């Protein structure tokens, strides 16, 4: 594993990489063969530039952004599966330590990313790592329960990724993984109010741009917080997008541990998503 993204993954014809404090960052993207994925990636890169300006105090001690150091697999995920014609966006909150933080893919449990989504690529490292939360990329041996539940469910329903991504895409509201000095994962709602709003105002605005780029008609928040933020942001922007929610598959959620698949199936059937995917 390398501390730097490989040149062949960084290079974009006609675009220069951005240098900041000696680090080479992903370049701005020129229009590509797929306009939707290019616009979507551009939204993410613009958000990254704004997020670098934020500073966090206690309880945050470590900040990881896998859309930067795991740019190679993240970009492959977007370019492979993000295209015109999506009608549903599943929206998570932010990366987990053994999912997207390792793979660059939302809810990116390693086996699901490698074996079902067929996404690979070299993963670098954040500027500063917690000794208990090392980034080993697709070599990570620990499974993320949320991601295994989420992608495992859709693998059963759709069998092949193409069926899922013909209609749906998956994204996180915030690309940052935030940790306390102990290594405890912190979600944005756990931040001090001023820092939380400074972060989420930027993420909300980026979500609106991403929704416009995708052209989806429904956003499904994975967990109550993602649902509430999406509803607030899209309504304030005047976007006529339906916002719904599905229970988060986190093992920290006792209800999810008692049968997340059954709850998710019932909700997605109610919303008409399962029939869209051919799962009923």
Image: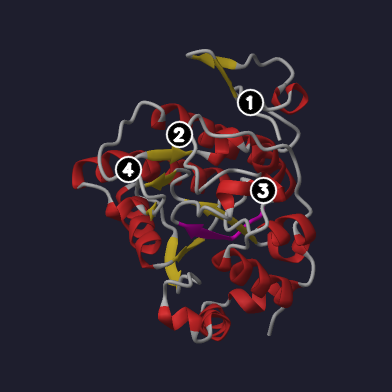
Name the element at disc 4.
Answer: loop
| Residue 18 visible in this rendered orientation of the protein | yes
- The residues tagged by marks 1 and 4 sit, at their Cα atoms, a distance apart of 31 Å
Farthest-out residue, left: 193
Q: Name the residue under label 2.
A: 47
Label placed on residue 41? none
Q: Is residue 87 magenta?
A: yes
- Horizontal side of residue 278 vs 102, given as left or right: right
**What residue is at 39 percent from the left and 54 percent from the top?**
184
Would you identify the image quadrant in which residue 149 lies? bottom right
- The residues tagged by marks 1 and 2 sit, at their Cα atoms, a distance apart of 14 Å
**Mark 1 vs 3, N-terminal side:** 1
Q: How crowded is mark 2: few (under 14 residues within 10 Å), some or many (20 or more)?
A: some
> How far from the left and from the top, in percent, is residue 140?
66, 52
Name the element at disc 1.
Answer: loop
Q: Name the residue under label 3.
A: 82
Q: Mark 4 points at which residue?
A: 60
The scheme the figure's colours follow is secondary structure
| Residue 166 visible in this rendered orientation of the protein | no
Quarter the N terminus occupies: top right
**What residue is at 71 percent from the left and 15 percent from the top?**
14
**Mark 1 vs 4, N-terminal side:** 1
**Mark 1 vs 2, N-terminal side:** 1
- The residues tagged by marks 4 and 3 sit, at their Cα atoms, a distance apart of 32 Å
Of tags 2 and 4, which is closer to the observer? Answer: 4
Q: Does the magenta stretch include residue 184?
A: no
> How far from the left and from the top, in percent, is residue 60?
32, 43
């Amino acid at each position: 594993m390398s501390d730097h993204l490989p040149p062949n993954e960084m290079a974009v014809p006609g675009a220069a990489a951005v240098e900041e404090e000696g680090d080479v960052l992903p370049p701005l993207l020129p229009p590509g063969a797929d306009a939707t994925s290019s616009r979507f990636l551009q939204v993410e890169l613009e958000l990254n530039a704004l997020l670098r300006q934020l500073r966090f105090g206690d309880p945050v001690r470590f900040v990881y952004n896998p859309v930067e150091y795991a740019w190679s697999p993240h970009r492959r995920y977007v370019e492979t599966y993000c295209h015109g014609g999506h009608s549903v966006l599943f929206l998570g909150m932010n990366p987990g330590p053994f999912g997207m933080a390792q793979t660059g893919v939302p809810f990116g449990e390693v086996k699901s990313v490698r074996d079902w989504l067929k996404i690979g690529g070299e993963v670098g490292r954040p500027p500063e790592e917690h000794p208990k939360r090392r980034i080993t990329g697709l070599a990570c041996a620990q499974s993320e329960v949320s991601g295994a539940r989420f992608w495992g469910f859709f693998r059963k329903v759709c069998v092949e990724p193409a069926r899922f991504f013909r209609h749906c895409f998956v994204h996180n509201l915030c690309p940052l993984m935030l940790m306390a000095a102990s290594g405890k994962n912190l979600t944005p709602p756990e931040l001090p109010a001023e820092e939380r709003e400074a972060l989420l105002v930027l993420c909300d605005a980026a979500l609106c741009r991403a929704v416009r780029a995708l052209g989806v008609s429904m956003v499904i928040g994975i967990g109550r917080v993602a649902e509430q933020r999406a509803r607030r942001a899209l309504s304030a922007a005047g976007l006529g997008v339906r916002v719904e929610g599905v229970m988060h598959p986190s093992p920290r959620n006792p209800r999810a541990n008692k049968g997340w698949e059954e709850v998710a199936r019932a909700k997605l059937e109610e919303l008409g998503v399962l029939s869209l995917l051919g799962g009923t």
